[in-house]
Amino acid sequence: MTVTAYNLCGFIFVAGIVWGIKMMSSPKTAEKGILLGFICMLGAIVTTLLHNEIITVFHLWPPVVIAVAVGYILAVKVSMIQMPQLVALLNGIGGGSSALVSLVVMLDSFPTMSLFNQSAAALGYIVGCITFSGSLVAAAKLDRKLKQEPVVLKKHTALSLLFLVCALSAAVLLVTGPESFARHLFFVAGGTALGFGILFTLRIGGADMPVTISLLNSLSGIAAAIAGLALRNFLLVAVGGIVGASGLILTQLMCRAMNKNILLIVTGKTRLLTAGAGENAFQVRETAGDDLAGIIRKAQKVVIVPGYGMAVAQAQEKVKDLSGLLLKAGKEVKFAVHPVAGRMPGHMNVLLAEVDIDYERLFEMEEINPELSKTDLVIVVGANDVINPAANTAEGTPIYGMPVLEVEKAGHIIICNKDTKPGYSGVDNPLYSRKNTTLFLGDAAETVVRLTALLK
């Protein structure tokens, strides 16, 4: 395949991927957008193999078959609640792949490469290693293999800076130093970059994981784009640039939604603080069933707030049943989705779409907040930090200043949470002690079933 034909095909595939991303912005066309993106990426891979005349190399295909099988198994076996850690893992695999590509390029032809290509290969190697190790730590935290609280070692900042400086210095020496030291510097650069990625992610708490995932996603794309520069591969540069740019935009949006500074997050300046005494700070009250049934029947405008607890309990099907009964009773039902309600951007939207809840009933925080003061009843299912009014008053806590769903303005609030302990932020929720709040404590699926039973 000629260079001109390859570039033309590359342009078509990149245009298709961009169009697929645009289609994924709407729930009605998201599935077709994903399919289009898949077809374009498959076409890009096959075209690249043809261009480099390696499509018939036998040793290439067994790893491809194994990778496809593993990817398929993961896609089928992983539940929606495990999707955040899977995304973090895939980010790491992407970063690791870019690091390996850069490493192979350097080992194969580093002395004969131009200064620009050498610099790109070294930088892609470092960014890929950071993304790989950082994403593995993020996945472990999300999967509770590591504790969610920030892990801060002695002299953590100094140690992180030392690893980063060593990695960058090794990369510079790779490009400018004698060739005899190159192979040793490969391992120094890679090892210190991996160490920095681990230290970087360890100090970030669970409450900031949505931002961390977005940032690592961006880094995986940036690593791919830089590796593409080293290879002089137009497709890899373009696709990596798309992923990197979209990840940075998403990171900015998530920071804005949490009212946080990205520098404070990545430097571990947001701490897991406890503002109160946990569940002992509240007098747990449950309104009698008959009274609560009356409150629900009188309510005309109902807003349901899903949270991470709903995801953990896999209660979305039960929530759909509850909303169905409310709709049959002639009530107006809406869902309020906070941008960071799950452990990754869009998590709640996907969970609700999974059980075919009408997407037109899902409203973002900016849309629903003005309506909450006119809402008769809010039903919270497994949400805490995103409805915590302490975000407006508890200075010095991780959620202070974070925009939240203003459910306290509703006529009545029913909270189906496991307990009254603080959420990921560690900040007690004064909403639990409000007179217009009813607590249904326990597993989200069970409490929603109890609530649904009151309407039958």
Image (cartoon, rainbow, N blue to C red):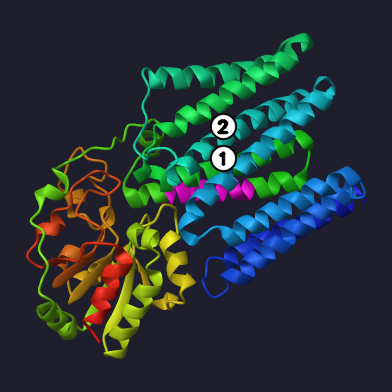
- Give the vertical position of 357 relative to 133 (above or below): below
Residue 115 point in image, percent of width and height:
75, 23
Q: Secondary structure at mark 2?
A: helix
Is 150 drawn above or below residue 301 in the view shown?
A: above
Q: Label 1 belongs to which residue?
A: 219
Main secondary structure found in the magenta portion: helix
Q: Position of residue 268 (x, y in %)?
A: 36, 32
- Left or right, 49 with respect to 125, comes to right
Q: Which residues are magenta?
A: 241-253
Q: Report if the CB atoms under discs 1 and 2 are less than 8 Å apart.
A: yes
Circle 1: residue type: Leu
Q: Amino acid at mark 2?
A: Ile
Horizontal side of 345 relative to 271 (left or right) equals: right
- Vertical arrangement, residue 86 with respect to residue 120, above or below: below
Residue 248: within the magenta?
yes
Badge 1 marks a residue whose secondary structure is helix
**Residue pictured at 15% horizontal, 85% vertical:** 298
Q: Residue at x 24, y 75 (%)?
A: 451
What residue is shown with label 2? Answer: 130
The CA distance from mark 1 to mark 2 is 9 Å
**Disc 1 packing (10 Å; few <14; some 14–19; many ≥20):** many
Of 96 and 252, nearer the camera is: 96
Counting from the top left corner in percent of width and height, residue 166 is at 56, 16
Which residue is at the front of the view, 284 or 326?
Answer: 284
Magenta stretch holds residue 319: no
Q: What x and y, as percent, mark residue 277?
A: 13, 43
